[in-house]
Image: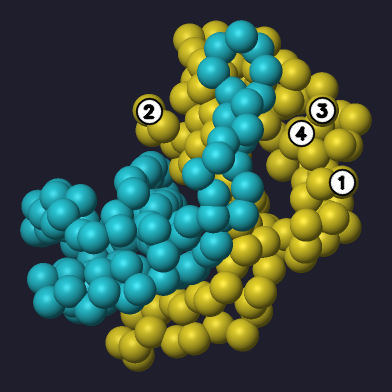
Chain colours: A yellow, B cyan
């Protein structure tokens, strides 16, 4: 197959988290791993994808806005966010997005 | 400053392009670079961010849906898309997203 195929899962939400780390990394990997495990347990969580070079991009996918709001207010996650601001990130940006359409290709 | 700040640029659009490459890379970097230059010249283009490990994530930002549609139909870009399917990607997925809200943090 060499065609793009349309998907039928829309609409749902994506949270695009772009970040630049500072030089401190103590505890970062462990916390990232913990948050990955914890996110999977949240109601409305659909998946997550991540890549990092100098810039890190993590996109998590959610059923709806209340699921995202609830995850942002999760107490363990709030602690991780605070650590992120205090220790690990020199910059980050969060974008809350409605996924309106999607298509994909598999060779 | 150690606070998240709200942005006022929304709404606009994000195209999340996630991809897995196969082992062929001939011409890929050159084409990626050319598409990066060409995208910047398009009406409605707002920016692009990219990171790649095993998975590649490229997010491009656009003013509106017609700008995205026009870029998808750009003849040089269509050729790059065909090459991508024929030569470089084993899988990709494109998500067209309305960015409803954003906030950011700078230390």
Callouts 4 and 2 in the same chain: yes
- Residue B74 visible, this orientation: yes
Give the spatial CA distance, label 4 vs label 2. 22 Å
Q: Quick one: A80 or A12, which is closer to the camera?
A: A12
Disc 1 to disc 3: CB gap under 8 Å: no
Disc 4 to disc 2: CB gap under 8 Å: no
- Label 2: element kind: loop
The tag on residue A11 is none
- The residue that mark 1 highlights is A70
Give the spatial CA distance, label 3 vs label 4. 13 Å
Residue B95: image location, x then y, percent: 49, 68
Q: First in sequence: mark 1 or mark 3? A: 1
Q: Which residue is painted at 76% across and 25% down in the image?
A: A80
Please rate how many residues cluster around mark 4, counting C-alpha atoms within 10 Å: few if below 14, some from 14 to 19, many from 20: some
Residue B33: image location, x then y, percent: 14, 49
Please rate how many residues cluster around mark 2, counting C-alpha atoms within 10 Å: few if below 14, some from 14 to 19, many from 20: few
Disc 2 to disc 3: CB gap under 8 Å: no
Q: First in sequence: mark 4 or mark 2? A: 4
- The residue that mark 3 highlights is A78
Q: Quick one: A69 or A77, which is closer to the camera?
A: A69
Q: Which residue is painted at 41% across and 71% down in the image?
A: B65
Residue A13: image location, x then y, percent: 67, 61
Callouts 4 and 1 in the same chain: yes
Q: Chain of mark 4?
A: A
- The residue that mark 4 highlights is A34
Q: Nearer the viewer, mark 3 or mark 4?
A: 3
Disc 3 to disc 4: CB gap under 8 Å: no
The tag on residue A54 is 2
- Label 1: element kind: helix
| Side of A70 relative to B107 (left or right) | right
């Amino acid at each position: 197959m060499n065609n793009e195929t349309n998907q039928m899962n829309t609409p749902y939400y994506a949270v695009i988290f772009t970040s630049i780390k500072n030089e401190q990394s103590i505890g970062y990997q462990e916390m990232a791993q913990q948050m990955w495990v914890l996110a999977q347990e949240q109601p409305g969580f659909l998946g997550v994808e991540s890549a990092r070079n100098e810039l890190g991009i993590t996109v998590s996918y959610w059923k709806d806005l209340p699921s995202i709001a609830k995850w942002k207010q999760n107490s363990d996650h709030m602690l991780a966010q605070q650590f992120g601001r205090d220790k690990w990130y020199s910059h980050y940006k969060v974008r809350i997005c409605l996924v309106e359409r999607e298509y994909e290709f598999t060779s």
